[in-house]
Amino acid sequence: MMQETLTFNDLPEVVSQVLSKVERLERVLDIIKDEVCKKSSSSAEHTPMTIDEACDFLKMKKSTMYYHIERNNIPATKRGKNYILFKDELVGWLESGRKSPVALSPEEMNAQKLSSIKRKPRRFGN
């Protein structure tokens, strides 16, 4: 590759060419990154599992797993005699039971407790 001698007057044109090439490379990298993310999230996460594999994944006893499946707490599909569970559905089930990650202030905790009271207060005057 032969190098041309650049003059000061050629610099703006050369810099614009370099910038356009860098922008094209960034676009290509973004496209590749999006494709890799789509493939990894869709194919790796939606994998079928047996009851034993799901128990190992959730660190749950088999009897507890059947308890939740029979009460439709855990999403499962029954094919013949066997249940089939999907990893992404199990992760979604776990996340749906998560408590609020943000700590509540004492005022918010008090308001939450007062709103959960379902009985009427006693009357002291009568």
Image (cartoon, rainbow, N blue to C red):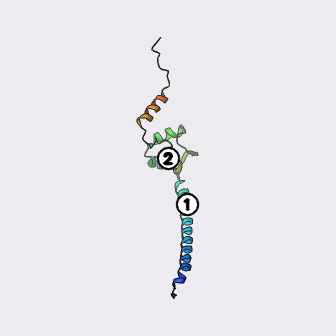
Percent coordinates x, y for residue 39 in the rendering: 55, 60
What residue do we see at 48% from left, 48% from top?
54
Q: Which residue is drawn at 57% across and 65% down?
A: 31
**Dot 1, crowdedness within 10 Å: few (<14), some or many (≥20)?**
few
Indicate the secondary structure of the residue bearing disc 2: helix
Identified by mark 2, the residue type is: Ile
- Could you tell me which residue is drawn at 56 percent across and 56 percent down? 42
Tell me how far mark 1 sits from mark 2, CA to CA.
25 Å
Considering every residue shown, the one lying at the far top of the view is 126
Instruction: Pick whichever, 88 or 50, lies toward us.
Output: 88
Judge whether residue 80 can be spotted in this image.
no
Residue 121 position, x and y percent, is 47, 20
How many marks overall? 2
Q: Closer to the camera, 17 or 33?
A: 17
Label 1 belongs to which residue?
39
Which secondary structure, mark 1? helix
The residue lying toward the viewer, choosing from 121 and 66, is 121
Q: Is residue 65 above or below residue 115?
A: below
Residue corresponding to mark 2: 51
Please provide percent x and percent y for residue 99: 46, 41
Q: Are marks 1 and 2 in contact (CB under 8 Å)?
A: no
Residue 104 position by quadrant: top left
